[in-house]
């Protein structure tokens, strides 16, 4: 059967600033709102949607550089469109905000492609699995012990999560007490901690030993993710049974390759809203598989669900509080956890989500 012609005929981006439901902080910063960039395109008579979490500058880059770069290209030719966008931001800089903008457009292209074929994106990518495990993620350092415990226990008891993650590093002197308190609330579920690179090598190593005694099974970014030697030190000398994880700030394939070549992580994280969309995430997944390293998605669970069904070596999907809340508020079809997993709705084509214009209007920037 001949496929339809599908030149990109229109591409727009909008920004929305959504307040958090409480003050939030991690080891290195604090925030009270999250900015969502939504990209929409028209091709072959269908409407594709993609998104990222980035600054308003990503919206402007889509309009000024990316929309002209992909105009008229066939949305089935995602590699051509992807490289056209990378070329269009050469003098701006491919990484950072530009990569996030490319990610949103790439996701919209894949969404449109699957809709034109009348199939869920998970099926178009090729499903290795029907369900993907999630871990609850939040536990911000701005929370008191009661709120922290209630949130983590809620994911275990309500969503069936077998693992939950909390932030550490804002006030290291209080972290052992916070971790002890959290551990007491989650029963037999695994506990992860994330320092967001807040600690020095020696301090991180000391905390790893103590966290290991408290049953922590995952230490994310104990030192800066740019400190590959430091991550390797933690991986080599940390307690047995504790995974060192990093990679969320990878914007391109070379970043992931360096991290894997240096054997710095037990689990590689990749974020399709940053690393070049579905196209970039598939590249990172292939590279992780080549290095026999488990892969975990970072935030944006609705965006990651189709590609998580396809990715080799997937460990889990991050069920991140901020983005779960936003995706449920602003997208029809956002996934619902059952027994610690999420599954794609195979009755919905494309990404399986549609943007709620009316619900989002009040947050427009």
Image (tube, helix red, strand yellow):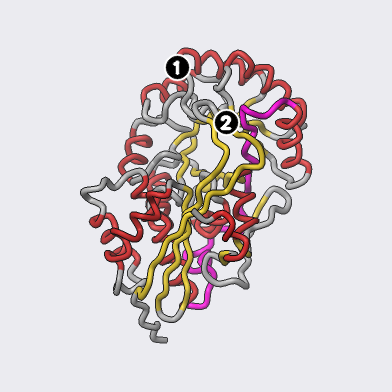
Q: Quadrant of residue 176?
A: top right
Q: Nearer the viewer, residue 49 or 18?
A: 18
- The residue to which callout 1 is attached is 200
Q: Nearer the viewer, residue 221 or 162?
A: 221
- The answer, for residue 353, to whether it is visible in the render is no
Identify the element where label 1 is drawn.
loop
Q: Quadrant of residue 359?
A: bottom right
Which one is closest to the eye, mark 2 or mark 1?
2
Q: Position of residue 131 (x, y in %)?
A: 63, 56
- The residue to which callout 2 is attached is 25
Determine whether, in the image, residue 232 is placed left or right of residue 87: right
Identify the residue at horizontal 66%, vertical 24% (top origin): 215
* Dot placed on the residue nearer the N-terminal end, 2 or 1: 2
Q: Position of residue 181 (x, y in %)?
A: 73, 23
Identify the residue at horizontal 32%, vertical 64% (top origin): 67
Q: Is residue 136 magenta?
A: yes
Q: Read off the magenta span.
A: 117-145
Determine whether, in the image, residue 230 is placed left or right of residue 306: left
């Amino acid at each position: 059967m001949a496929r339809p012609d599908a030149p990109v005929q229109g591409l727009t981006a909008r920004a929305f600033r959504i307040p958090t439901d409480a003050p939030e902080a991690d080891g290195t910063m604090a925030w009270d709102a999250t900015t969502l960039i939504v990209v929409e395109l028209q091709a072959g008579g269908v409407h594709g949607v993609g998104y990222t979490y980035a600054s308003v500058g990503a919206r402007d880059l889509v309009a000024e550089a990316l929309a002209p770069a992909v105009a008229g290209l066939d949305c089935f030719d995602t590699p051509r469109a992807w490289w056209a966008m990378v070329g269009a931001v050469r003098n701006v800089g491919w990484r950072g905000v530009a990569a996030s903008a490319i990610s949103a457009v790439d996701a919209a292209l894949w969404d449109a492609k699957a809709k034109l074929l009348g199939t869920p994106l998970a099926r178009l990518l090729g499903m290795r699995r029907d369900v993907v495990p999630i871990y609850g993620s939040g536990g911000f350092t701005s929370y008191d012990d009661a709120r922290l415990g209630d949130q983590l226990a809620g994911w275990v008891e309500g969503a069936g999560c077998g693992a939950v993650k909390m932030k550490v590093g804002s006030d290291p002197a209080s972290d052992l007490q916070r971790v002890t308190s959290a551990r007491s609330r989650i029963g037999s579920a695994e506990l992860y901690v994330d320092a967001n690179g807040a600690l020095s090598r020696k301090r991180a190593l000391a905390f790893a030993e103590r966290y290991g005694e408290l049953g922590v099974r995952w230490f994310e970014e104990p030192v800066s993710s740019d400190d590959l030697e430091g991550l390797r030190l933690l991986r080599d000398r940390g307690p047995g049974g504790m995974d060192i994880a990093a990679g969320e700030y990878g914007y391109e394939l070379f970043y992931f390759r360096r991290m894997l070549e240096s054997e710095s992580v037990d689990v590689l994280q990749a974020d399709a809203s940053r690393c070049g969309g579905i196209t970039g995430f598939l590249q990172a997944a292939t590279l992780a598989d080549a290095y026999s390293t488990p892969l975990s998605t970072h935030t944006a669970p609705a965006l990651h669900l189709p590609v998580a069904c396809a990715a080799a070596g997937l460990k889990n999907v991050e069920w991140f509080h901020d983005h779960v809340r936003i995706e449920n508020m602003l997208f029809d079809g956002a996934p619902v956890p059952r027994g610690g997993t999420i599954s794609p709705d195979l009755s919905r084509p494309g990404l399986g989500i549609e943007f709620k214009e009316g619900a989002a209007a009040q947050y427009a920037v």
